Image (spheres, helix red, strand yellow):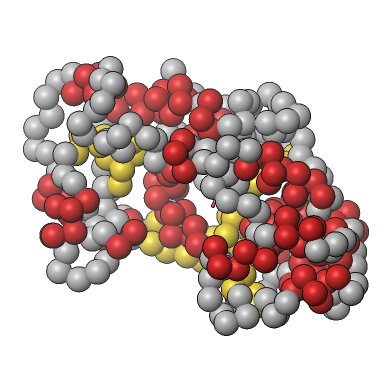
């Protein structure tokens, strides 16, 4: 049975990397902000590995990410390597919780099976639109009749032939973000009824993140601004599961010297490559602290010394543009 636990007495934040690639400057900056915010409030910090999508997770990557975070001087109170009351801390070991949450949503009549393919949906589009380049799922495709037992039958199937979608009610969702201010989104118009479990049996990020944040007592979600447009969907799910939304902060992205989003080509911007180039943790963290508006100059500084300086009001609202040859510049500091 899925039940939302009481909120913890102290603020609780988390960093939730997907082990699909090495930690890079952008994700390290977000992790630092998440950690500083919670440490500044005397709260509890949780580390969770989001390895939902088996084939995309790279073996050993989670350990490498954790090692980079520790190198930066970050620590966590609950996590895969230190344990904690709400584990396991790998999403790949939490499928039972996601299934329980689906059962609860089903009992509340918020789910339906969907056999419409991505291709069918794309063909419905008159213009490029919505999340992931897909048009919003049209309410006209909702089934008018559900065969009793459809949910149990899909659940017991090794190779389900249908995705499970969440019925989105028509109403705007508004939330306050520590960086972006008041944000309003019309989920029904932007994405429509969204997928919670894919046709191939993989649980959707939106479901897993909501279930884990609720069960782990997370009161503050800090992540990259690329996930800002997921938040309204997650709030609808939290409410449907009987929980209360956490506080949110979406940290602006880091872009390369050309102003583009960091990609595989920006290989030199992984923490591993900075470490291999001999950059010290203090030089790197001081640089990040400066980029977050917490230090006047990018002078070397340990993470712990930034805690007392942390304030969401100082965080720049624009993407942070990296200079050319970051490793070279940091080596000198
Ligand atoms: N696992 C996601 C990522 O690495 C972050 C999810 C979240 O913070 O909500 O991008």
Q: Is residue 169 left or right of residue 44?
A: left
Give the camera-side residue of 324 and 40: 324
State the residue in front, 332 or 233: 332
- Asked where in the image residue 240 lies, by quadrant, the reply is top left
State the image coordinates of residue 301 (x, y, percent, origin top left).
Answer: 90, 64
Query: Which quarter shows the C terminus?
Result: bottom right
| Location of residue 201 in the rendering, given as x and y in whole percent from the top left corner | 33, 31
- Looking at the picture, does residue 159 appear above or below residue 12? above
Q: Nearer the viewer, residue 315 or 6?
A: 315
Could you tell whether 298 is left or right of 181 in the image?
Answer: right
Residue 235, relative to residue 87: is it above or below? below
Count all numbered tags in the image, as a single digit: 0
Q: Quadrant of the N terminus?
A: top left
> Does the image show residue 202?
yes
Which residue is farthest left?
144
Q: Residue at x 58, y 51 (%)?
A: 21
Q: Residue at x 75, y 49 (%)?
A: 68
- Is residue 4 in sight in this rendering? no
Q: Residue at x 15, y 69 (%)?
A: 126
| Position of residue 41 in the picture relative to residue 136 (left or right) | right
Which residue is most to the front? 276
In-image side of 206 versus 103 (left or right): right
Residue at 14% x, 52% y: name it. 120
x and y, in percent, of residue 310 in the image: 80, 62
Against 163, is 234 above or below? Answer: below
Q: Position of residue 180 (x, y in %)?
A: 56, 68
Occupied quadrant, residue 7 = top right
- Quadrant location of residue 5? top right
Of residues 234 and 181, which is closer to you in this image? 234
């Amino acid at each position: 049975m899925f039940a939302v636990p009481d909120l913890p007495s102290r603020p609780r934040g988390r960093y939730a990397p997907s082990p699909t690639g090495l930690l890079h400057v952008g994700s390290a900056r977000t992790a630092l902000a998440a950690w500083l915010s919670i440490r500044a409030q005397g709260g509890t910090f949780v580390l969770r590995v989001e390895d939902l999508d088996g084939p995309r997770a790279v073996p050993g990557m989670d350990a490498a990410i954790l090692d980079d975070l520790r190198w930066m001087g970050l620590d966590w109170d609950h996590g895969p390597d230190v344990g904690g009351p709400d584990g396991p801390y790998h999403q790949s070991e939490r499928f039972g919780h996601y299934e329980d949450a689906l059962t609860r949503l089903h009992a509340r009549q918020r789910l339906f099976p969907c056999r419409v393919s991505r291709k069918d949906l794309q063909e419905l589009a008159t213009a490029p639109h919505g999340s992931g380049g897909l048009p919003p799922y049209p309410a006209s495709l909702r089934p008018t009749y559900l065969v009793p037992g459809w949910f149990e039958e899909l659940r017991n199937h090794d190779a389900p032939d249908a995705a499970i979608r969440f019925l989105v009610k028509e109403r705007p969702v508004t939330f306050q973000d520590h960086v972006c201010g008041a944000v309003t989104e019309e989920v029904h118009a932007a994405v429509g009824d969204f997928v919670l479990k894919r046709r191939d049996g993989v649980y959707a990020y939106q479901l897993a993140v909501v279930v884990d944040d609720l069960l782990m007592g997370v009161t503050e979600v800090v992540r990259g601004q690329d996930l800002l447009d997921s938040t309204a969907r997650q709030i609808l799910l939290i409410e449907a599961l009987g929980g209360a939304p956490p506080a949110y902060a979406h940290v602006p992205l880091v872009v390369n010297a050309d102003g583009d989003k960091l990609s595989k080509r920006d290989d030199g911007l992984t923490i591993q490559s900075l470490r291999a180039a001999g950059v010290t943790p203090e030089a790197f963290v001081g640089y990040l602290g400066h980029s977050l508006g917490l230090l006047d100059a990018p002078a070397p500084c340990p993470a712990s010394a930034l805690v007392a300086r942390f304030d969401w009001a100082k965080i720049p609202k624009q993407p942070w543009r990296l200079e050319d040859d970051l490793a070279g510049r940091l080596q000198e500091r």
